[in-house]
Amino acid sequence: MRALWLLIFLPLWSDTVSVDGPPFEPQEALKTIKVPDGIRVDLVAAEPLVADPVAMDIDEYGRIWVAEMPGYPLDVGGSGRIKILHDTDQDGRPDSATVFADGLRLPTGIMRWKDGVLVTDPPDIFYLPDNDGDSRADSHIVVLTGFALSNPQHNANSPIYGLTNWIYVANNSTIWWTEKYADPFGDQGEQVYFPDNPEGDRLPRNAADRNARFRPDTYELELLGGRSQFGHTFDAWGRHFLVNNSQHHLVEALASQYLERRPELPIQTTIHRTSDHGDAAEVYPITIDPLHQLLTDRGVFTSACALTWQLGGLLPAPFDSSITLVAEPVHNLVHIDRIVPDGPVFRSERVLEKREFIASTDSWFRPVNFTIGPDGGIYVVDYYREIIEHPEWMDDSLAATGDLHQGTDRGRIYRIVPEDTPELNWHGKLSLANATVDELVDRLASDNIWWRRNAQRILVSRNRQDAVAPLSKMAASSTSALGRLHALWTLNGLGALTTSQITSALDDSHPGVRENAIRLTELVLSENPELGQSLLAMTEDTNVRVRYQLLNTLGFVPGSDAAKLRLLAQNIESEWFQTAALLALDVSTHDLMQTVLNELAAPEHVIDRFVLRLARILARTNGLVPALTNDGPALGSRLAGAAEGLQQRQNRIAISRELSEHLVELALSPDDELGNAAVALLEAVILPEPESLEQAQLIATDINQTVDARVRAVRILSLMPNNIGILPALLDSSYPVEVQLASVEALGAQSGTGPAQLLLQSWPNLWPRSRNRALDQFSTQDRANLLVTALEEGVILTEEISWYQRVRLMRDTEEPVRSRARAILKLEDAAPGELAIPGGPGNNDRGQVLFENLCAQCHMAGEVGTGAIGPNLATVQHWPRHVLLAELQNPSQRIASGYESWRLTRTNGSIIEGIIASETSSAITMRSLTETVVVPRQDVKELTAMPGSFMPPGLNMALEPNDLRDLLSFLRQELPQQ
């Protein structure tokens, strides 16, 4: 369909666009940009006025400020600039530029502040004042420092003056493993702090890889709950929306201050993925001869950035309400979504089907940022470069050429407006800077966020106490809900907001104002506890967002658990309400679980899911209390949650003989769900010496029992220390493979090398699946030595060792085992160009089988595989064979962001190796090939980045040439020759 669409429309454009490009001159480039009917694109500025623009702001005088980054991707020598665009002939359009500041490294954002601008230029955030009005910065004042100078796509960026009068900065995790560019981009940051107030607030290294907010005048500094890669945005009511390269739309669902109430709770995430079209969602470029680099994903979001709410109030339907924009510079387009409520969070939906809001046929069109202007138009910052990708993920031969910097003398700014909008006429002609107090207050009710935000910033930064009276009037009686909202927060910024004004706002007719009034109570609740009564009266509010905010805020109101439970009961199907209740309630987790089981009315599956979460937390924090195992409703969920929680504890707990026998009885019951939960719990505790295992042994060997029942019986037998019993007999090939698999694991669970010797003795009788599982039982140091000996002696053939098992042996912590393993498993080295791969297409079906055997434990390819610790390889379909071969030979030369390998050491000495699946202020979620483990931060002794990929080099040499061709054919989804 995409190709057909191009064929239909390209003839209409080819008559108007010059063939002498790209690059195109600005007016020619303008013709390549396509927008929906009724929308117009204006060229505002281009080279030589601007070059390499990455961000812009428009101040109260109507001046355009531009941050330029000519150094991207590799030059950190100080080529970054800030420019001011001027209108010397008074026609409302820029015609000259002044370099306001230079000598910056890689500036990533700009925001008007007082007499100058704030600029993010990691590791610093600068204030660049112009005290004498000569359009030149008088000094470079470091406001904050300590952010990482990592890959430019991951550095702190995009300062925004928020509704709350704090300045918000987007920040993301650094690139820990950079093989080629460690010198300029290997910095991981330090503590973030105000150099002018070194004894004041400090954030962890690189602000814990999370967004942050600060107040320069009062030296206040805070971590936020989420992270955003390049860009972030707020809706009209102050809700924070985030973005990363492949996830184009996220929202911070849980603010960090609520996690701090219960730091012992291992909350896995504070971020909600809003897109109903998924991660790495499909996009619809129209680019002619796109210049995608070899290692860039195609046809899906791979460079999503600059998420922006359309709050200008200018665009026509269907783009006028609840709309966000996100740039996708790799595909030369701008995507648009409609945001709809989804319980306490949101869902983002496509506005246009199989097309984009802005798209260009020009492969140099690189939209990287947006600004809403004073006219309500959307101003698009076009970096206009041939190559936008960083060489970290680029073919080495291209990175070595000068093409990386093609276009450093170019750059454009466009305006997106309705077709009948007058030409741009405001530049340099605005008078907001000299407006009276009444005029500034009136602007707080504007339909356009530019006027509201800048009027509020000016009033607060100038401390206009003479605005308190008109602000109070607006907060009480304005017909504009947005006006009432901004009046309240502006009064707060001036230190003049009263409790009576907050109380009145709690009863406002608009839910967005009520929601913000609840947030405002948090700032004064400790000095004005009577506000708690006003909050308690709101539990029946008709708006779900108001109720959600109320539940979070009631966590700071003592004695309000009854109200919190009512809110939970009304909204229990929402996992975000469940999480908010866990953090807000003063009642113990034990009592909350009893209330949920006995008093809350909800569908059984909802109760079961919540009870499982509660049981997990209760077991993690309190151990195996009777409420987790007593007979009664949701017993299976309680047992399963208890098992998960106990597995997260540093040390196992012992249980009584009576409880052990009760759980064994449940495990051997015919109810599979209950039985599996009971076995899982038994596996998570220390059991007493058994009096008898006769029933388990009988069931394990009884051919009349179901396979599931026999497997559970074997799992029970495995729990008894050094009780091998009948387990070796169950390895016979006459038993069902599921029973044999369970027996293999049961033997592996026993201590010492004896059980491993039994597995080797039974090797000829093991089914292939059982052999693979048996090899996993040799992970301890003494058993790894046995396995290498078995390989050396030919008891086990090297081809029976899976790729992951090879990884484990070849990365063994003991040098003798590691050396012997590498000697017997070594792969001959060869350059990709020397590999003899038969020409022509391979067999995709055979390639899929090879992928499932060799790769699927770590990766996915489309819907095939697990994706446990490796990226989805569906994104490499367009990579040439020689590039894929190079990656197979040396997978550590480029590691996809988010898939770096880490070693987490707990305070009890246990070690987990894997990727960081998610993290919050209270927990780190580690994912390995075999498990996902949530580790509370207080249990983390050390977290260390491990060099290189989990995948060792040389897979290309482990395959026959025909097999390698088939595997590459499957990964590339090559079509058979017709």
Image (cartoon, helix red, strand yellow):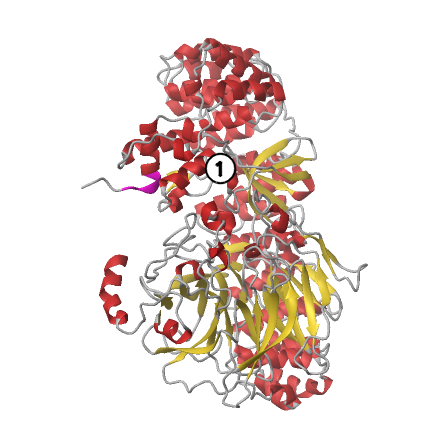
Residue 336, percent from left and from top:
41, 66
Write down the quadrant of residue 946 in the picture: top right
Relative placement, left or right, of 584 versus 143 is left
The magenta segment:
970-974
Task: Say which of 969 and 468 sits in front.
Answer: 969
Residue at image mark 1: 891
Quadrant hosting residue 120 = bottom right
Q: Secondary structure at mark 1?
A: helix
Residue 667, placed above or below residue 161: above
Kindly give the residue lying farthest to the left in the view shown.
978
Give coordinates of residue 287: x percent, y percent: 34, 62
Q: Is residue 651 left or right of residue 19?
A: right
**Residue 604, position in %: x, y?**
44, 46
472 left or right of 278?
A: right
Is residue 207 shown above or below 167?
above
Which residue appears at 35% of the width and 70% of the height? 32
Rendering quarter of residue 958:
top left
Q: Quadrant of the N terminus?
A: bottom left
Q: State the quadrant of the C terminus.
A: top left
